[in-house]
Amino acid sequence: MNPFELNALEVSNIVDDLLKTKRFRYNFCDNIILGLKVKDLSQELMPVKRKLEMFSPREIVDTYKLVLLYLMDLLVEKVQRFKSKNFNLTNNVINEIIRLMRLIWQAHDFDEIQELEPEFKSNVQHQIYKLMKGINY
């Protein structure tokens, strides 16, 4: 394994952060725009930030969903590596990821995506932690 490759827990942390869509929408590029005040980037990103805060254009939501689905597919790849360690738990986690992917694909807005975060955390992220720590329940 490449030492710079993300493991399953790291990928699940990224997915969990992206499921917190309000944070994405309201904190979009705050470090560049408000913190460091990088003038050229700030001028270009501020209209996007305002648009995200006010409403969610369908094309932005759809693109966001594609990024989430890509990362969740990557997560399936990482989780499959645990099949020899705990076959049943691994299959349960993979099935839950697939179920959540379907719900994300069908979501109409950021709020519907955000509602899935607690399920992801308990049914996927915590289970991955168990797999990685060798805890069998």
Image (cartoon, helix red, strand yellow):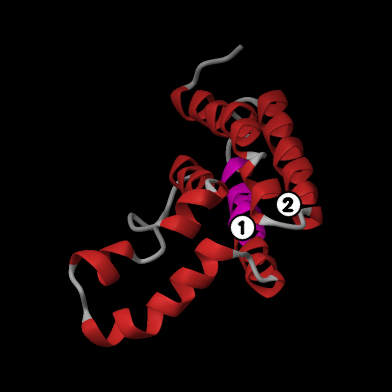
**What residue sits 45% from the left and 70% below the top?**
49
- Residue 89 lies left or right of residue 21; in this view the side is right
Amino acid under disc 2: Ile
Query: Do residues under tags 1 and 2 come within 8 Å of each other at their CB atoms?
Result: yes
Q: Farthest residue toward the bottom? A: 40
**What residue sits 49% from the left and 28% below the top?**
129
- Residue 28 lies left or right of residue 86; in this view the side is left
**Residue 110 disc label:** none
The secondary element bearing badge 2 is classed as helix
Q: The C terminus is located in which quarter?
A: top right
Q: Farthest residue toward the top? A: 137
Residue receiving disc 2: 104
Q: Quadrant of residue 27?
A: bottom left
Alpha-carbon neighbours of circle 1 within 10 Å: few (<14), some, or many (≥20)?
many
Q: Nearer the viewer, residue 72 or 50?
A: 50
Q: Farthest residue toward the front? A: 54
Alpha-carbon neighbours of circle 2 within 10 Å: few (<14), some, or many (≥20)?
many
Of marks 1 and 2, which one's residue comes earlier in the chain? 1
Amino acid under disc 1: Leu
Q: Nearer the viewer, residue 133 or 9?
A: 9
The secondary element bearing badge 1 is classed as helix
Q: Nearer the viewer, residue 131 or 64?
A: 64
Asked if residue 19 is positioned above or below residue 46 in the image, the reply reads above
**Residue 68 disc label:** 1
| Percent position of residue 88, x then y | 72, 24
Magenta stretch secondary structure, dominant? helix
Q: Quadrant of residue 38?
A: bottom left
Give the residues in magenta: 68-79
**What residue sits 61% from the left and 64% below the top?**
55
Asked if residue 7 is positioned above or below residue 134 in the image, the reply reads below
| Percent position of residue 12, x then y | 52, 43
